[in-house]
Amino acid sequence: MRKNIVAGNWKMHKTLTESQALTTEIRGVIRDEFRSNNAEIIICPTNLAIASISKLVEGSGIKVGAQNCHFETQGAFTGEVSATMLVAAGATHVIIGHSERRQYFNENNELLSKKKKASLAAGLTVLYCVGETLQERESDTHWGIIEAQITEGLAGLNSSDMERMIIAYEPVWAIGTGKTASADQAQEVHAFIRNLLDTRFGAAIAENVSILYGGSVKPDNAKELFAMKDIDGGLIGGASLKARDFFDIVQAFA
């Protein structure tokens, strides 16, 4: 049975003090107003805040994730953080392959596959991001792009590994732009991804992997998106930086 999931990606926002304040506000709203809808809630602050936030959410059911990691456990990699370090700081999840990492840091499917394997080996659950640019969608090459991201990025993983994998579909043209794929457009791609998982890992795995939508989800469109058959929640950017907006998205599941 796949999970309904709402994950907040705070990106490079919020100082440590601001992160603590936002976490306290989110935790308070969830404690006071959350009606159980079996949604799993994950917040992904900057690495500097992970240890502190992990302590703040103890006992709340909120999970803490990181936004990236290195594929080695240690070594001469100045400025990098390993998956084992993230686990020691209190993280249970990690985002791998976000479009901004692909675009600005030239991360390709081969590198991301190594990061996923390291993350899984350390005990983390991976939120693996896939998606196309506007140019790729308009040229109708997006299906091939997404298929390569899935098949190459998940290369070497087995059925047991897939139990700790979450896929996030993020149309790059709808991230931070205010544009959103229609619910039908998003569902079409989510169904395509699930079919790829079926082909690669079998129907049982495909049906149990949560696939999140990650393109400008807001309180006013979350309900329609989450009602789609193959959309199991959202990877939330800007709206996750406001406690009320994030909570309203969590509550959007029917």
Image: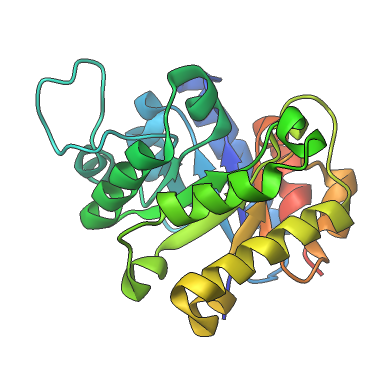
* Residue 15 visible: no
In this rendering, would 15 be left or right of 83?
A: right
Spot occupied by residue 104 in the image (x, y as percentages of width and height) = 50, 18
**Total numbered labels placed on residues in the image:** 0
Spot occupied by residue 80 in the image (x, y as percentages of width and height) = 26, 23
Q: Please name the residue shown 52% across and 35% down the image.
A: 98
Q: Please name the residue shown 47% across and 71% down the image.
A: 200
Q: Quadrant of the C terminus?
A: bottom right
In this rendering, would 194 be left or right of 69?
A: right
Q: Is 139 above or below relative to 80?
A: below
Q: Please name the residue shown 42% across and 41% down the image.
A: 109
In this rendering, would 1 be left or right of 231?
A: left
In this rendering, would 164 be left or right of 77?
A: right
Spot occupied by residue 186 in the image (x, y as percentages of width and height) = 79, 53
- Most distant residue in the left direction: 75
* Residue 118 visible: yes
Q: Is 207 above or below relative to 125?
A: below
Instruction: Looking at the picture, tell me which residue is in the foreground, 237 or 113.
Output: 113
Q: Quadrant of the N terminus?
A: bottom right
Q: Quadrant of residue 46?
A: top left
Q: Quadrant of residue 49?
A: top left
Q: How is the image coloured?
A: rainbow
Spot occupied by residue 172 in the image (x, y as percentages of width and height) = 69, 33
Q: Please name the residue shown 44% across and 23% down the image.
A: 106
Instruction: Looking at the picture, tell me which residue is in the foreground, 11 or 167.
Output: 167
